[in-house]
Amino acid sequence: YLWIKRNNYKKYDCVQIISFKESEWQLPKYLEAMNHAGYNEIYLNNDKKEIISREVPNRKWYTNLNDRKTIEYVLFHRKK
């Protein structure tokens, strides 16, 4: 994301759909990395500051059936 910031994408927001194998600790680390790269997290409703998420059933063949359910997150960031 530092590459995006350096290469004149200053006027664009960053919107991502992303999932993690262990979101309990990986999501906070990811958000910290985005902050370090120069992006503030933004929310659709600033009063609640909730991250949009959904459970994803029936993942593809390459996921292990014994894994916990997959959760996808929609993240919005804006350059500082």
Image (cartoon, rainbow, N blue to C red):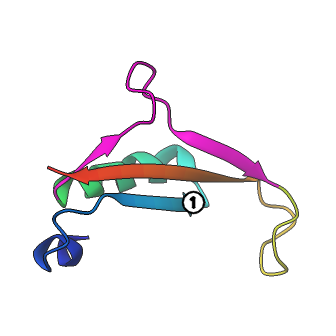
The quadrant in which the N terminus is found is bottom left
Horizontal arrangement in the rendering, residue 63 relative to residue 33 (left or right): right
**Residue at (62, 44) in percent of width and height:** 53
User: Which residue carries the number 1 mark?
Assistant: 20
Instruction: Give the quadrant of residue 9.
Output: bottom left
Is residue 57 shown above or below 5?
Answer: above
Residue 29, horizontal then vertical, whole percent = 36, 52
Horizontal arrangement in the rendering, residue 19 relative to residue 66 (left or right): left
Residue 32, horizontal then vertical, whole percent = 28, 49
Question: SS class of the residue under badge 1?
Answer: loop
**Residue at (40, 18) in percent of width and height:** 47
Is residue 12 shown above or below 54?
Answer: below
Q: Nearer the viewer, residue 23 or 45?
A: 45
Please identify the residue farthest to the top as the structure is shown. Answer: 47
Q: How many marks?
A: 1
Q: Looking at numbered disc 1 in the image, what kind of residue is underneath it? A: Phe
Q: Does the magenta stretch include residue 1?
A: no
Q: Nearer the viewer, residue 71 or 43?
A: 43
Please identify the residue farthest to the front as the structure is shown. Answer: 11
Horizontal arrangement in the rendering, residue 37 relative to residue 76 (left or right): left
Q: Badge 1 local density, few (<14 within 10 Å), some, or many (20+)?
A: some
Instruction: Give the quadrant of residue 67.
Output: bottom right
**Residue at (45, 51) in percent of width and height:** 75
**Residue at (16, 70) in percent of width and height:** 5
Q: Is residue 41 magenta?
A: yes
Residue 40, horizontal then vertical, whole percent = 24, 46
Horizontal arrangement in the rendering, residue 41 relative to residue 61 (left or right): left
Instruction: Tell me where the magenta segment starts and ends, as one range.
Output: 38-56
Residue 52, horizontal then vertical, whole percent = 57, 41
